[in-house]
Image (tube, grey):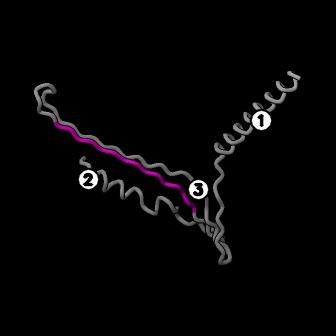
Amino acid sequence: MDIMELMERSKDAATVKRVFGEPIQQGDVVVIPVARVSQGGGGGQGQSKGEKNGEGTGSGGGFGLIATPAGVYVLKDGDAHWRPAVDVNRVVLAGQIVAVVLLLTLRTLIKKRHKR
């Protein structure tokens, strides 16, 4: 696969269909799922005919696509409302950071009291 073919495939992968999912209808409510899509790619090429390196050729390429839930749009009675997705891992990490800062602050306060 050459670099241009890789780039064409990456454009096809990053379409709006990857961001907005198929609408789901239940009664008079329509829910449209939304995702955050990130992509990256790279390529390479090489060729050496020098005496030190010997004969050689090369090529390479890669592409990555990550999609994470962002939330949903809820359409009801002519109104659209955004409902963000809750990232439980992020909430737990934030709680752990707050707990560590609290413990370090308490330790400092206790040390100062004992010195008096």
Numbered badge on residue 102? 1
Mark nearer the N terminus (3 vs 1): 3
Q: Quadrant of residue 84?
A: bottom right
**111 left or right of 6?**
right
Please give the residue where the numbered disc 3 appears in the rendered image. Answer: 70
Is residue 58 one of those drawn in magenta?
no
Measured Cα–Cα span from mark 3 to mark 1: 30 Å
Q: Is residue 68 visible?
A: yes
Is residue 40 one of those drawn in magenta?
yes
Relative image position of residue 47 (x, y in whole percent):
17, 37
Give above or below for 106 relative to 95.
above
Which kind of residue does numbered mark 2 sit on?
A: Met
Which kind of residue does numbered mark 1 sit on?
A: Leu
Measured Cα–Cα span from mark 1 to mark 2: 53 Å
Q: Nearer the viewer, residue 94 or 80?
A: 94
* Image: magenta residue range: 33-47
**33 left or right of 96?**
left
Question: At x 52% / y 61%, what residue is drawn?
Answer: 21
Relative image position of residue 116 (x, y in whole percent):
89, 23
Which residue appears farthest toward the bottom when viewing the image? Answer: 78
Which kind of residue does numbered mark 3 sit on?
A: Ala
Mark 1 element type: helix
**113 left or right of 71?**
right
Relative image position of residue 74 (x, y in whole percent):
64, 67
**Mark 3 surroundings within 10 Å by alpha-carbon count, few (fewer than 14), some (14 through 19), many (20 or more):** some
Mark nearer the N terminus (1 vs 2): 2
The main secondary structure of the magenta stretch is strand
Please give the residue where the numbered disc 2 appears in the rendered image. Answer: 4
Numbered badge on residue 22? none
Name the mark nearer the viewer: 1 or 2: 1
Q: Quadrant of residue 106?
A: top right
Which residue appears farthest toward the front when viewing the image? Answer: 116
